[in-house]
């Protein structure tokens, strides 16, 4: 059996020369030449290399099975860092997980050895000189150098338009790169398809730009200052040392696309650029803002309405009350997220750190200096969540920078403490601060929102903008009402509409996370006549949120209305619209006086009437000449405690 391409090619060529020199008939020689051509074609087909299976090593940017992994200087890494036998020293924040002599590193050590064996066994079909680069171009294939090798100048790897083109370079000795050497990928070549197998030390001089996964066998690896690696450095046995360099794992080749966690539901908080649930909101200097400004407890002062594209809620109103509730929901969601990556050095946050779509944890007070890059890896829907368990402050001129499709609307910062964004900083994303003040200072730019559950909020000569996605809800006027009634061990939902026939019903225990409950279809033709529907939920919970929506042919939902049904002990309240009026049904309340109010969404009180609360079910009616739009209805006890609040759409076209 032939073990190498060289042996097979030499033998075939030797046979061809013999045949040419002996006396054979033309037919016999023709038959041999045909066989020779088929043999070469078969050989080429069989010699095509396959990409090695990296296994768990695919998640590491730096790893050695046996040896220390050491960093000096300011280095940035995206990917896990680890050793299966040795210390990890000198690293700051890494966009990955440190694994030192644990189950993950043990599995990785085995996978690195497997990958090395596969690379070492690949049959070569090219044999370049030991000096690579100097403007040379390599096409896809397996290359073998029978000695030490070096890289100088530029080396081009050309896939010729094939994104699956595979490059394997086998070096039977040490490998070095001269200063400023570069591996450049052209015509569709991907770094994830480039592999270097080295039988000796790997030493990349300063400012080298390396591409591909490097597997060193029984030897050390050294990355020097200003080096850049798009790939991985893996050693079967040997120390890895890096100094002031940047290394990122390659993407593509079937690697999972990072999406990050699901975004929190902001609700009405999406309408606000600046908001405090409990605290004063003040401005000094000339601030330009896009979005509402408000507080639910306290006052708002110092903002120029001519410079604010949104509503300034100078005093608490129904809108700020809803915002405070929705902000608490969003905070609760973020607060229970499980982080993927812990950034181990909160006081060193920044310094050109690159983050990808994940949930990150900074487990103490955090100082942000310089720049942070958010890299969506070309996924425009990727979400970034940064959880800070402590106060958060920045240096002057700090910047959050979006790259490769990242969007401000998909960035969230949850901070347990005060937030201070120092002068002339650019901050991106929605800040949700819990029980802490927020300070936005001279010359700052905020592309997102600054929201705190409780704490004073101050701005000074700020430029702020936000996305308006999710800020308002437009409901079709053909829905006449949607209500729910608690029965014995069931909830009866009913609604009426004109010219809507396909519905979906969703259910939630918290008003944030909904699951599909039922699909309702009406096969009859609907022509401008009200149609009534009912649905019974035979698995009620103590407090349930039911959401009615239409579903288009493509599966997309349009939310119509949400109603709340209390099937447990205590007050049970429901509101709905019918025949041009708004009705509120209540039971289980402490007997006495109550107050029924109706507000516009901007906080204007439209209707205020006294009602009598009883233990038995009572129905209250609001009759008012209203234009089509979204309204807020509240029911409270005589002492002002709100026992029910809901948003309703009123249509002036209701029959």
Image: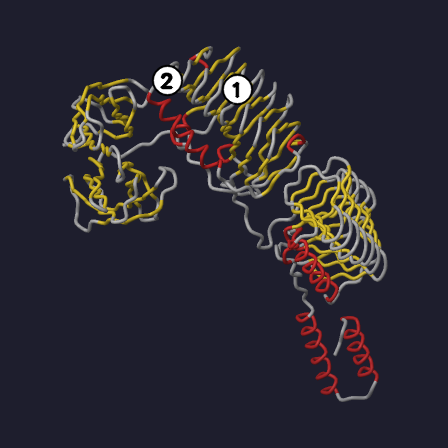
Front one among 611 and 80: 611
What is the crowding at mark 1: few (fewer than 14 residues within 10 Å), some, or many (at least 20)?
Answer: many
Q: Which mark is residue 463?
A: 1
Q: Secondary structure at mark 1?
A: strand
Q: Is residue 400 left or right of residue 456?
A: right
Front one among 499 and 332: 332
Image quadrant of residue 316?
Answer: top left
Q: Which mark is residue 316?
A: 2
Image position, residue 425 (x, y; %): 60, 22
Q: Is residue 538 above or below residue 611?
A: below
Q: Secondary structure at mark 2?
A: loop
Q: Is residue 75 above or below residue 171?
A: above
Q: Is residue 107 left or right of residue 646?
A: right
Residue at the (76%, 74%) spot, across then down: 3
Residue at the (74%, 35%) spot, across then down: 74
Of badges 1 and 2, the one in the foreground is 2
Pointer 1 and pointer 2: residues touching (CB < 8 Å)?
no
């Amino acid at each position: 059996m032939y073990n190498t391409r060289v042996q097979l090619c030499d033998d075939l060529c030797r046979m061809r020369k013999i045949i040419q020199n002996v006396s054979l008939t033309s037919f016999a020689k023709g038959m041999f030449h045909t066989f020779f051509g088929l043999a070469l074609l078969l050989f080429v087909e069989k010699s095509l290399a396959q990409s090695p299976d990296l296994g768990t090593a695919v998640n590491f940017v730096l790893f050695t099975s046996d040896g220390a992994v050491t960093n000096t200087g300011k280095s940035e890494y995206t990917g896990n860092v680890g050793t299966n036998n040795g210390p990890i020293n000198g690293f700051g924040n890494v966009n990955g997980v440190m694994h030192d002599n644990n189950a993950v590193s043990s599995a990785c050590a085995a996978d690195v050895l497997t990958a090395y064996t596969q690379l070492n066994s690949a049959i070569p079909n090219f044999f370049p000189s030991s000096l690579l680069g100097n403007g040379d171009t390599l096409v896809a294939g397996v290359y073998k150098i029978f000695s030490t090798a070096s890289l100088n100048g530029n080396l081009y790897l050309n896939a010729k338009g094939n994104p699956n083109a595979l490059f394997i370079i086998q070096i039977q000795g040490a490998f070095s790169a001269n200063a400023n050497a570069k591996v450049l990928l052209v015509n569709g070549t991907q770094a994830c398809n480039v592999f270097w197998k080295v039988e000796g030390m790997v030493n990349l001089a300063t400012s080298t730009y390396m591409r591909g996964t490097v597997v060193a066998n029984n030897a050390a690896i050294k990355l020097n200052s200003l080096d850049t690696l798009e790939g991985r450095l893996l050693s079967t046995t040997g120390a890895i040392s890096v100094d002031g360099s940047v290394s990122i794992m390659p993407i593509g080749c079937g690697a999972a696309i990072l999406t990050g966690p699901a975004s929190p539901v902001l609700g009405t908080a999406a309408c606000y650029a600046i908001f405090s649930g409990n605290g004063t909101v003040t401005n000094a200097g000339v601030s330009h803002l896009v979005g509402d400004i408000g507080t639910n407890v306290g006052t708002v002062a110092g903002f120029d309405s001519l410079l604010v594209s949104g509503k300034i809620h100078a005093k608490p109103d129904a809108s700020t009350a809803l915002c405070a509730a929705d902000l608490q929901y969003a905070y609760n969601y973020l607060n229970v997220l499980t982080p993927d990556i812990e950034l181990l050095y909160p006081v060193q946050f920044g310094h050109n750190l690159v983050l990808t779509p994940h949930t990150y944890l900074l487990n103490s007070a955090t100082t942000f200096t310089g720049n942070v890059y958010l890299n969506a890896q070309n996924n425009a829907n990727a979400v970034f969540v940064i959880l800070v368990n402590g106060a958060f402050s920045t240096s002057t001129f700090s910047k959050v920078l979006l790259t490769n499709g990242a969007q401000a609307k998909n960035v969230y910062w949850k901070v347990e403490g005060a937030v201070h964004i120092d002068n002339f900083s650019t901050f991106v994303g929605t800040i949700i601060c819990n029980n802490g003040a927020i300070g936005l200072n001279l010359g700052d730019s905020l592309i997102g929102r600054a929201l705190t559950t409780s704490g004073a909020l101050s701005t000074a000569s700020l430029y702020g903008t936000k996305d308006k996605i999710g800020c308002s809800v437009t409901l079709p006027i053909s829905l006449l009402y949607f209500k729910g009634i608690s029965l014995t061990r069931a909830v009866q939902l009913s609604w009426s509409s004109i010219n809507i026939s396909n519905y979906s019903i969703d259910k939630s225990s918290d008003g944030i996370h909904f699951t599909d409950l039922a699909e309702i279809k009406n096969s009859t033709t609907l022509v401008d006549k009200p149609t009534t529907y009912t649905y019974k939920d035979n698995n009620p919970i103590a407090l349930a949120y039911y959401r009615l929506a239409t579903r288009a042919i493509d599966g997309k939902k349009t939310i119509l209305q949400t109603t709340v049904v209390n099937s447990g002990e205590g007050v049970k309240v429901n509101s709905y619209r019918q025949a041009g009026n708004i009705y509120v049904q209540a039971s289980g309340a402490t007997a006495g006086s109550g107050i029924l109010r109706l507000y516009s969404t901007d906080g204007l009180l439209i209707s205020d009437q006294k009602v009598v609360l009883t233990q038995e079910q009572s129905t209250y009616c609001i009759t008012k000449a209203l234009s089509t739009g979204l309204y807020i209805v509240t029911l409270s006890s005589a002492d002002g405690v709100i026992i029910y609040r809901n948003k309703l759409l009123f249509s002036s076209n209701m029959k």
